Amino acid sequence: MGKLKTEEFVVNMGPVHPATHGVCRLMLTMDGEKVVKIEPVIGYLHRAIEKICENRTYPQCIPLMDRFEYVTSMSTNQVFAQAAERLAGIEVPERAEYLRVIMLELNRIASHLIFYGVTAMDLGALTPFLYGLREREYIVDLFEMTCGQRLTYNYIRVGGVSRDIPPQFVPKCREALKIIGDKLRDYEGLLNENPIWLRRTRGIGHLPADLAISYGVSGPVLRASGVDYDIRRDDPYSIYDRFDWEVPVRHNGDCYDRYLLRLDEIKQSIKIIEQALDGLPEGDIKAKVSPNFKPPAGEVYSRVENSRGEMGVYIQSDGTNKPLRVKCRGGSYNQLQALPHFGTDVLVADLVAIFATLDIILPEVDR
Amino acid sequence: MGDNLGNLELAHVFYWLRDLLLATGLTEPWVTIVTYTALGAMMFGVLALLALFLVWWERKIGGHIQQRFGPMRTGWHGWYQTVMDALKLLQKEDVVVDKRDKFVFFWAPVVCFVAAFLAYVVMPFGNRLIVADLNIGILYIMAVTTFTVISLLMAGWGSNNKYALLGGLRSAAQVVSYEVPMVASILTVIVYAGSLSMVDIVEAQSGLFINWNIFRLPFGPIAFIVYIIAATAEANRTPFDIPEAEQELVAGFNIEYSGMKFAMFFLAEFVNMFTVSAIAVTLFFGGWNGVFLPSWLWFLLKTLGVVLLLMLFRWTYPRLRVDQLMEFAWKFLVPLAFANLILGSIMKYLGWYW
């Protein structure tokens, strides 16, 4: 019997689709169930954040940056504040640096908890989603206690942080870390050894290290492909060089490793926060910075390790109180860029798994 | 047919209704037609209520597994939530796609709904509580439950939507594959009961629970496990819910349906879930047999127990991929079911059982 002749057809996955985490549109050329070609179409969430920044003073840009990547907006605050500080040569007080690290790592845990829930839900397991969000609630409560916000924090400011932590923060934070550490075992018990989960993720969506590097993929996705690279360690910012922690690396580069790596990162983040809570000094939380400060003319690129890879901000200053040009870099953009090159020749169900474990969020892609 | 009802409890209702109608002066063919219609309406009402209850129950169970409450606002623990949902769906505008295949699109939910209820003609709800004790009972059930797949294919084709079409094709492949191990495991039971009639199968398991097929058959648990896995697939439940896999196909075959047409698919799914559980109880857990409680209550409790199992599956497991699903059916379940059938038949022939 000769090979059956089949015809390819185009399916639009998105912009409104349950598995694209926002408004990503993937134009899939499919041969039956098999994905032959992926063409991402982006821009549905473009809000011109970079352009709006040009008309605002530096402190006014920070709430905008919250919207740049709302799942981990502490990182976006940090990366912009850091860039402005480097431009203007502002020294950040010791206590503020500790608070920044605590908040950044708490936010990383919160983001990875969402990843855990959403990935499981994309693969059809409905319950882990609620579990992940339940533990995230402890962290969000801590943020609310500190800065009054649960999603877009506007907490890390140029020169420090917006306000000091309340006295009950430290015990509450330790308690939350203990609960999350314990619950991680539940998470692993629910999925890690589940045969259906293993068959859906192990060996699926292999991203080779050289392809990842050539497309600028960074963060957990890169480390799951076996590249030992973490900006927190390799280009230390804030006070990350003072803590004792490891960069988890896994070598298979498949969906399963990307999933496990994020669980490993939660454990390392807990380690960092505990050390930061132990070493938290007394003192000022904000350097004296005029709201209208004028950095000297020049340019700067600052970057942080976000839960979705390298997040960077490039600022060009002309000596006025407003930036001349702002350019943001989000890790999701590069991961989406690499997707058509390793995500094809799989079934549509696998594409959902790959897309979920890349942990792309669209505001970061479209800005 | 009325005379075949001789020793059944439902017959009392039947004869009472017929006498009543005869007294009003109706003549014979009409009397039978009206009585059977009334019986059908009664069954339909009971099952529709049951489906409404199952929807509510599933939401409560899902809620509690996920550490939330589920519906709470409408009545005590939200008990009439699904009634209100059904009323809402009834009022909704029936949105239809322009380029649908009109005939197929319209009839798909109807076929699905009717097919879901057909199996109850031969379902023994309790001792002498059955609509018709056909001597090919289980064969009839296998025949009519497969009708569902035709309706899913119709919905997939008629919607003129790529997602729906993929969903319909997936469900066709799935149901055809899982029918094989399902029938093979049912055959094991039939070999021991020596009859296709549902009543005979239940009566062969009368007495203590040790006489239930799951314990009495040489490999009863294996037959049951194969059946329940295949049944989960047959009812399109997670981990086998690929025809409507939300994260892949958005809603699969029912993507273009709204309002009451959607409700018919939805209710049919829950009726199907009850059907496969009721068959499991009849075949493996002694049907209505039990002590102290009335037979229909035993049947209902056991069936709800199996339904609970299906619900726990749904809220715990991820979804299989379509090719893994086929692989699982043909490479694992089918050999297992047939090995079980052959071994069971040999042991029956040699008399190695009690």
Image (tube, grey):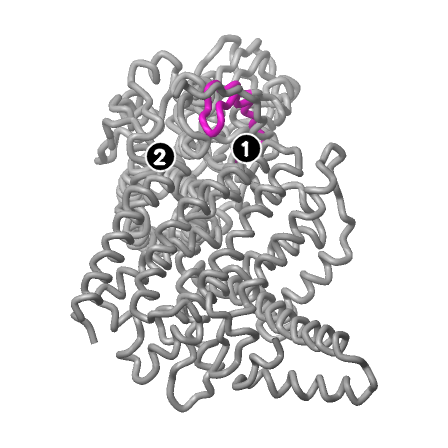
Type of the residue with mark 1: Asp
Q: Residue A94 carries which label?
A: 2
Mark 1 highlights which residue? A66
> Which residue occupies the foreground of this view, B2 or A125?
B2
How packed mark 1 is, by other alpha carbons closer than 10 Å (few <14, some 14-19, many 20 or more), is: many
Q: Provide the secondary structure element on which disc 2 rests.
A: helix
Chain of the residue displaying label 2: A
Q: Which residue is drawn at 57% across and 72% down?
A: B77
Measured as percent of width and height from the top left, residue B103 is found at: 73, 42
Residue under the point 65% across and 56% down: B264
Mark-to-mark CA distance, 1 and 2: 24 Å
The picture quadrant where one finds residue B56 is bottom right
Q: Main secondary structure of the magenta part?
A: strand
Q: Can residue A313 be seen in this view?
A: yes
| Marks 1 and 2 belong to one chain | yes
> In which quarter of the view is residue A367 placed?
top right
Q: Label 1: chain?
A: A
What amino acid does circle 2 point to? Glu
Mark 1 or mark 2: which is in front?
1
State the extent of the magenta-drawn residues as a range. Answer: A20-40
Mark 1 vs 2: CB contact within 8 A: no
Magenta highlight on residue A22: yes
**Picture coordinates of residue A36, whole percent (x, y):** 46, 20
